[in-house]
Image: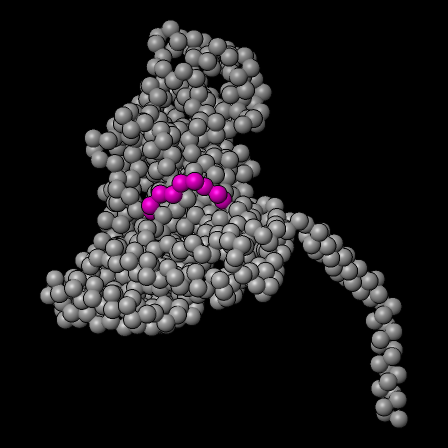
Amino acid sequence: MEIQYVIINFLIVAAIVFFAGRKTIKSIFSKRLKRIDDELEEIARIEAMKIPAIEDFKPDSENEIFSEEIEKATRDAQAKILRIEAFSKRECHEIHKEAVEKAGVEIFNTIKSSVAELFSQEPYLSDLRAHEADMVDDILKEVKLTPGDLTYLKHHDVLYVTLTSAHKLSNDIVNKVDEFTTDMLNRVNGATSLWVREDPSLIGGLKLRIGDTVYDCTVAEDLYRYEKSLCRDIPFSTSGNDILYEFTHKAEVFKPKIHIYQLGRVMTVSDGICWMDGLADIMYGEVIEFECGERGMVLDIQHNRIGCVVFGEYENIESGSRVRRVGRIASVPVGDELLGRVVDSIGNPIDGEGYIITEERRPIEFKAPAILDRQGVSEPLQTGLKAVDALVPIGKGQRELIIGDRQTGKSAVAVDAIINQKGKGTVCIYVAIGQKETTVSEIRETLEKNGALDYTVIVAATASGSAATQYIAPFSATAMGEHFMYNGRDVLIVYDDLSKHAVAYRELSLLLHRPSGREAYPGDIFYLHSRLLERSAKLSEELGGGSMTALPIIETQAGDISAYIPTNVISITDGQIFLDTELFNEGQRPAINVGLSVSRVGGSAQTKLMKQVSSNLRTRLAQYRELAGFMQFGAEVDSETAKTIESGRRLTEALKQPRYKPLPDKYQVLLLFAIAEGYSNDVDVNSMEEFEAALYKYFEAEQSEVIKILEKGEKLDKENQDKLREALSEFKLMGVEPRTPQN
């Protein structure tokens, strides 16, 4: 009876599910069926493609026997590669990196299995083995002892030599290698120990390892090189069948190339740091590749081990696995192709907008321009902020520090400067170090909304990334900027922020077991930031006259600018913009503390007109701040002091500016001149914003000739000053109704 109830209940539930969800189920299955039908149609279309004639893969000699097995294997490999490439072209029309790499791996696996099968059969096997003696001769011509080998022999009597081949070698070849290496080591008072091994995974050919250096002449090494090119390049730009053809056509004359590289061994790996031995001739900053495919950069070289940071997932690296030198210093892609994109610390796109293909790369570490290669800072780089351009001007090639507590508008000042470069031919680079991903996304949206993303590169090493990526990010971004600078263009680079960069480097240094100093920072923390910021400069005309202006950001704790990292960076840079928490809380935007902010370039980074108008601005603001503090005690003041305070209040109010609304230099000068000449004395302090908006609107509509004079940026003579005063008097008499400014 209970079983009957169970069955009845089950049928009721099934009926309810069917009638309630039949539309949803039908929708799901209809979409799936449509996708299956589309894929079947695509497969049918691909299979209908004309596959290259198999005769193209046959040896030229008519006497050679081309087996049916080889013909079938080659044809199957061709068909599979065509399917993968057709699928890649359909799915990767925007060239997404993940799809490209996946297609490259599939094509390579097909080629590898096909080549391994082909070279295991006649006539390929015999033809390849016939070249083994020639391969040995070519290898021995390249063999030489490296500085690492000679150093090893000073502490050890024997240098180990390993001869490895896919098949058993003849005694003549083994004896030739033994005699050559023995004679070579005898000349340096050393001995050799020869090991002979067989490894079928090499497919064909042989390799000789002397110490850490490998002279590789195997099919497997050629395949490895092609695999890297497939993962790096677009797999369907050069057909995979072309690669298969290169390995298989005319097998009787096929001969692998000699590849020379050095090998090492992983000792330990943890927390993104890998310790290795071997690789005796490696250099600081060089890229190494692990057996699992991950890469890293050497940051520590000791007498018995080498330390490196891992770029990818260090969990994939196993102790005892092999590691090889890539043969180049760590570098990043550079060029106009990066503009408008968001990339990680090694130049890979992370914005989901497709693969970036560039023709050039630059090392992330590069020497700073020499003194004779520079010229003085004389051209202004306007930020569009009244308080900055008038009080702490920035010139092209300058390094101006933005410093202040958390949440005081430091990033907003830098982003405003980027937005203000629109239409001025300046390339901008924003480096986010240790920022939240949402923050980086917001900045990207802000730049895009204001039309600034087209000439900006965002390099993001977010808080979720490793310390290694945060350490590398500013150096990589500087390399990207140097490409434009050395090509005669102007660059603005923002490091947001170097406090987190210092923390990341401290973490790496402690993991690398380096001795710590003040606040646990390593002793070379000053050199870290100095060699980074010294790369910003204004180049001489002989080198093209390009420039790179740096805006590093430092976060302070409770306004303490005398802390370790802030004082370090202050001493490196050419001035600082100090954002005060108290001013920020009072509503001053940007909250620039005039007393603590300074530009060591000064008037050289201003137009002659701005320099003329703002000459006494700093003094007036300093007087106001001092008198305003005195007034807090309720003291009575004379009329002259009260007038100074009221003027200072209006000036302070006029310097306020909303975020992401940079102001052209002509309007800044117009406003400052009007306030300095007293045309705002009868304006209520709370109405300064309306006064400013009406002023701009009136002059743009009624005084275009005066605006043209201001646009030149030249110092005003007496005649032009009188014209400007006359126009301001007319503005006051007309009583123009204030309106919101149109930016």
- Asked where in the image residue 401 lies, by quadrant, the reply is top left
Q: In which quadrant of the rendered image does the C terminus lie? A: top right
Q: Is residue 40 left or right of residue 451?
A: right
* Residue at horizontal 30 percent and vertical 64 percent from the top: 208
Up-down relation of residue 277 to residue 455 (above or below): below
Residue 111, horizontal then vertical, whole percent? 52, 59
| Residue 587 seen in the current view | no
- The residue at the point 29 percent across, 53 percent down is 285
Q: Residue 24, percent across and down?
A: 80, 62
In this rendering, position of residue 314 left or right of residue 565: right
Number of marks in the rendered image: 0
Report whether residue 19 is seen. yes
Q: Seen from this angle, which residue lies furthest front? A: 63
Residue 8 vertical position relative to residue 271 in the rendered view, above or below: below
Rendered position, 175 above or below 141: below
Q: Residue furthest bottom?
A: 1
Please tell me which residue lies in front, 176 or 109: 176
The vertical placement of 639 against 48, above or below, is above
Residue 319 sits in quarter: bottom left
Decide if residue 734 is on the left or right side of residue 679. right
Query: Position of 515 compared to 123: left or right?
Result: left
Q: Nearer the viewer, residue 255 or 741?
A: 255
What colouring does the structure picture have?
one colour
- The residue positioned 40% from the left and 63% from the top of the image is 129
Residue under the point 23% across and 68% down: 178
Q: Which residues are magenta?
A: 356-364
Q: Quadrant of the N terminus?
A: bottom right
From the top left corner, tell me how far across and down residue 87 is, in percent.
63, 53
Determine if the magenta segment contains residue 416: no
